[in-house]
Image: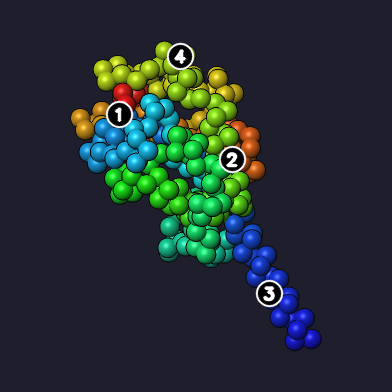
Amino acid sequence: MKLALSFALLLSLVLAVSSTAEEFDFFYLVQQWPGSFCDTEQGCCFPSTGKPAADFGIHGLWPNYAVCRTGGEPDAEFSIVGARKKCWPEYCNDDNPLSLLEIKDLLKPLDRNWPSLSCKNGGQSMRFWSYEWRKHGTCSGLDQHDYFEAALALKSRHNLTAILASAGIVPSDSRTYFLSSIRDAISDATGFAVNLECNRDESSEAQLFQVYQCVDRDGKELIDCTLPMRSKCTDRVKLPSF
Ligand code: AMP
């Protein structure tokens, strides 16, 4: 009897842990324009592999909730502080750090498509990937290899830099573009609505920083982004050179 009870307890614990990892509604695939990361006050540092291409780079593949949660029952298992709103799960398993061995066949494409630009990482993109895996990937329900492979596959399906260039939206330090033309170019080419995030350059001018594409729970297919997002964008924005 005691044995059966302990087994049931263990089983419910295992189920609780695995459901924590999988409880979300969709992913954001977040890609970042490197020129807009580097021309801010904080500046940037290139990875040891060299200056990345003038191309959108992956920031992360982030599990997200369709409805933000406040304190109480559903959030008890996540690191919620007080009644602060929680819009995504994070840090779901600190016992599963990223291992180079698990992703060794992906290192070249990761270097090319997911470069670190932060000076905090000492030129090591692996530090950026480890951070993203620990914060977001451990909540994805995917293993390490599938998580990074999914992000790379999604990025390669639609080349944002080429999509914008075909609409005449090319990097420039003097021109500005209608935010709506950027939004329309991407949704026309991919078939799905996206969210856009801007930041400010050193002269406080608004520039396109990140593109958020929404992806189904399997990490395979794009879906429309329907949640509003705070974005710091203005009607006209820059796409600075890199
Ligand atoms: P997250 O916590 O996943 O929203 O990511 C935010 C963190 O990622 C911040 O500390 C940023 O400085 C860092 N970050 C954003 N873009 C890059 C990049 N290209 N390289 C390295 N770190 C980055």
Would residue 15 be found to the left or right of residue 148 on screen? right
Kindly indicate whether the residue at mark 2 contacts the one at mark 4 (C-beta within 8 angstroms): no
Q: State the residue at coordinates (29%, 40%).
A: 45
Would residue 8 be found to the left or right of residue 27 on screen? right
Pinpoint residue 122: horizontal percent, then vertical percent: 31, 48
Pinpoint residue 24: horizontal percent, then vertical percent: 59, 50
Q: Give the amino acid type for the residue marked by disc 4 in the picture.
A: Ala
Q: Earlier in the sequence, mark 2 or mark 1?
A: 2
Q: Earlier in the sequence, mark 2 or mark 3?
A: 3
Task: Measure the C-alpha gap from mark 2 to mark 3.
Answer: 32 Å
Q: Nearer the viewer, residue 103 or 5?
A: 103
Secondary element under disc 3, as helix, strand or loop, is helix
Q: Nearer the viewer, residue 87 or 46?
A: 46
Is residue 183 depicted above or below 12 in this figure? above
Q: Earlier in the sequence, mark 4 or mark 3?
A: 3
Q: Mark 1 or mark 4: which is in front?
A: 4
Task: Measure the C-alpha gap from mark 2 to mark 1.
Answer: 31 Å
Please name the residue that numbered disc 2 is placed on. 150
Secondary element under disc 2, as helix, strand or loop, is helix
Kindly indicate whether the residue at mark 3 contacts the one at mark 2 (C-beta within 8 angstroms): no
Q: Give the amino acid type for the residue marked by disc 1 in the picture.
A: Ala
Please name the residue that numbered disc 3 is placed on. 10
Please name the residue that numbered disc 4 is placed on. 167
Is residue 49 depicted above or below 193 in this figure? below
Please name the residue that numbered disc 1 is placed on. 206
